[in-house]
Image (cartoon, rainbow, N blue to C red):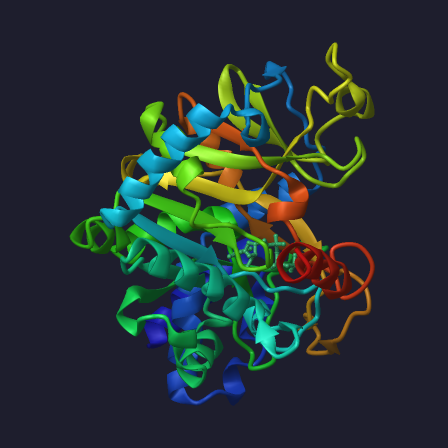
Amino acid sequence: MVEKEQSVREKLAKYGQEHLLLKYDSMSENEKELLLNQILEINFEQILELYENTKKEIQFGEDKIEPIEYIDKNKLNENDRDKYTKIGEEIIKAGKLGFITMAGGQGTRLGHKGPKGTFKLIGEKTLFQLICETLIEGKNKYGVNIPWYIMTSRENNDDTVAFFEKENYFGYPKDCVVFFKQGELPMISEKGKILLDKDGFVKQAADGHGGIFEAIIKNNLLEDMKNRGLEWLFIGGVDNCLVKMCDPLFIGLTAENNYLAAGKSLVKANPAERVGVFCKRNGRPSVIEYTEISKEMSEMTDKNGELLYGEAHVLMNMFNIKALENLEKNKLPYHSAFKKAEFYDEKGNWIVPDSPNAYKFESFIFDAFSNLDKMLIMRVKREEEFAPVKNAEGTDSPETARKLYNDYIVNR
Ligand code: UTP
């Protein structure tokens, strides 16, 4: 222990992070051990690099960006639509489809106490329940149990599992639900200091939805998926109450045309909408973030007046298990997000901010796309598949999502 403490102190001094031991002396022996281990696991060089990156502008430099081809679901002729739907249905009936819901985010903008999926959106129905209802529909329609993997984070895992237990898994077969935790990274202040949480431990936050690939491998899920006979995994977010995970046409189109990955797109509401769009980057599938795209580029249109970069990416993707195996091998870059975080500063003051004050580092699922040779993009109708709950009020809030849900599901 003495040696461990000594090596931690040396490390902290080297990187100017000595404040991490601020509460050390008042801790129990167990807590001390925990904190030292936490610190020893930090890759300080990486944190330093991430901090330096927060000061740099995002650029796509020499990358060649081009529009990407897509298939408009609503322009398929009836023959094709039926053909691919049947192929997809066979895949589902054969038990080759699984679902993944990414629910590891912090949901800071919504400000709901507890995991975002436990937010009651439609009467007493929570986001988890609304998603589950569509899965139950699929399960009953195709007569097969469809495994549902739910990605959580250290912060919300226990509450999420307890919630499912309390709700009796909404009637979904319990042995088909698998929770798994994603990784995390320390948060830092504007000055590059690693934050301490209220108990004096390192304040860590989930490492972004791109952490899904590493989490799948670390939790041995590929093994579990193979044992269950899965070949295709639909991956969606927890905060879109219209997400259509069980979609035979989407699966059929992807599988029959030999793609290993696919994404559903929506037409951007307007050129300035704050969403990433699918594109080709150096000939490979990719997404340009709204922070990355110039005004000029976002407004470019084709001869029919459609936006050239108008296929919004809204976290509705599907991967073949072979693609999942390969994607984990490529480390994804981290992006910084400026968020509100409570923490102890270096002098021991507990800081409760009313505006963003700290950096969180996240990788994005779409950064993995450029490791694929090709990807099928299927355009779907926004009003049928997209009702996000992001903010407490205004755009993409419970109020707007509720209206979209009621318009499409209830009053249809
Ligand atoms: P968002 O990027 O909108 O973030 O997540 P968020 O955490 O829900 O909300 P804010 O930004 O703090 O307000 C989109 C989807 O990705 C999941 C979220 O749970 C949501 O389903 N996600 C995000 C993760 O699973 N892990 C993460 O680390 C981040």
Residue at the location (45% across, 82% down)? 167
Please state if 348 lies on the left or on the right of 44 as rendered.
Answer: right
Ligand 1: which quarter?
Answer: bottom right
Please count the marks in the image: 0
> For this rendering, which residue is in front, 142 or 386?
142
**Residue 85 lies in quadrant:** top left
Residue at the location (44% across, 72% down)? 157
> For this rendering, which residue is in front, 177 or 411?
411
> For this rendering, which residue is in front, 344 or 315?
315
Above or below — where is 33 with respect to 384?
Answer: below
Residue at the location (53% across, 15% down)? 282
Above or below — where is 78 with respect to 33?
Answer: above
Residue at the location (54% across, 28% down)? 286
Image spot of residue 2 (x, y percent): 35, 76
Image spot of residue 114 (x, y percent): 58, 76
Quadrant containing the N terminus in the rendered view? bottom left
Quadrant containing the C terminus in the rendered view? bottom right
Please state if 321 lies on the left or on the right of 390 as rendered.
Answer: left
Q: Residue furthest left?
A: 227
Please state if 56 lies on the left or on the right of 195 as rendered.
Answer: right
Above or below — where is 1 with respect to 332?
Answer: below
Residue 376 in view in this figure: yes
Please state if 239 lies on the left or on the right of 1 as rendered.
Answer: right
Image spot of residue 325 (x, y percent): 28, 39
**Residue 272 lies in quadrant:** top right
